[in-house]
Amino acid sequence: MNDNSDNSVVRRQRVSRDDWLAAALEILAVGGIETVKIDRLAKRLGVAKSGFYWHFKNRSDLQEQILRHWQDVYTKTLTDDAAFFEIDPATALRLIAARVDTEDLAQYDLAISEWSKHDDRAKAAYRSVIEMRLSFVSHLFESLGFSGTELEMRAHLFVGYHSTETSVFLDLPHGDRKTLRKQRLDFLLSGAPNK
């Protein structure tokens, strides 16, 4: 019996802030922000509820950190990667699209969007992330020579599609998704003045 309690203590010590946030995002995606509760998170992680307070002040602090975590892990991991600006912009856009797909970086976008409809903090975070993504890909399309409405259309299509594809086309097989991604990028990059 002592061995089991020792293991649970060890397990509790290994649950990081990021573990709590990952579990919170999973619950959010299934049931909305109302279902992201401290006791539910603790149960999902197999730890005591008191462990929550090592990482968060309260539920409101958790919600703010969920939004920051979503921004950092699912957007800034790309937008802050200087390597994308050191390669050909067309190649960069193809690599970004592939990473969004293969790393499932849009998996929580719909849940955050739904949350943003009735929470000002979530609305501000959602808008900020979309603007960050648009600015990032707009710069790449601009580097290819696009401007004006041609630039705006391509940036919006790129961000809009990649932010919603997995939640709209749920049953699209990976092979088909990859083929469509290539054709979509061929279309968006066609007619680039600087290519």
Image (tube, rainbow, N blue to C red):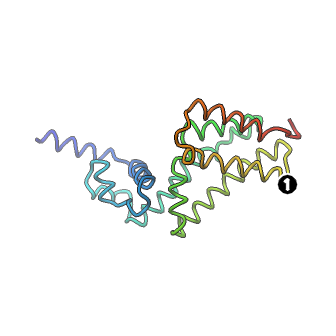
Residue closest to the far right: 193
Residue that appears at 54% across and 70% down: 120
Q: Residues within 10 Å of mark 1 (few under 14, many from 20)?
A: few
- Percent across and percent down for residue 97 are 65, 39
Q: Nearer the viewer, residue 107 or 142?
A: 107
Give the SS element for disc 1. helix
Q: Is residue 34 above or below residue 106?
A: below
On-image quarter of the C terminus: top right
Q: Is residue 100 above or below residue 25?
A: above
- Percent across and percent down for residue 29 are 45, 53
User: In this figure, what is the number of numbered marks?
Assistant: 1
Question: According to the image, label 1 marks what residue?
Answer: 148
For residue 129, which quarter of the picture? Answer: bottom right
Residue that appears at 65% across and 42% down: 81
Along the horizontal axis of the image, is 181 left or right of 119? right
Q: Looking at numbered disc 1 in the image, what kind of residue is underneath it?
A: Gly
Along the horizontal axis of the image, is 7 left or right of 52? left
- Percent across and percent down for residue 100 are 60, 41
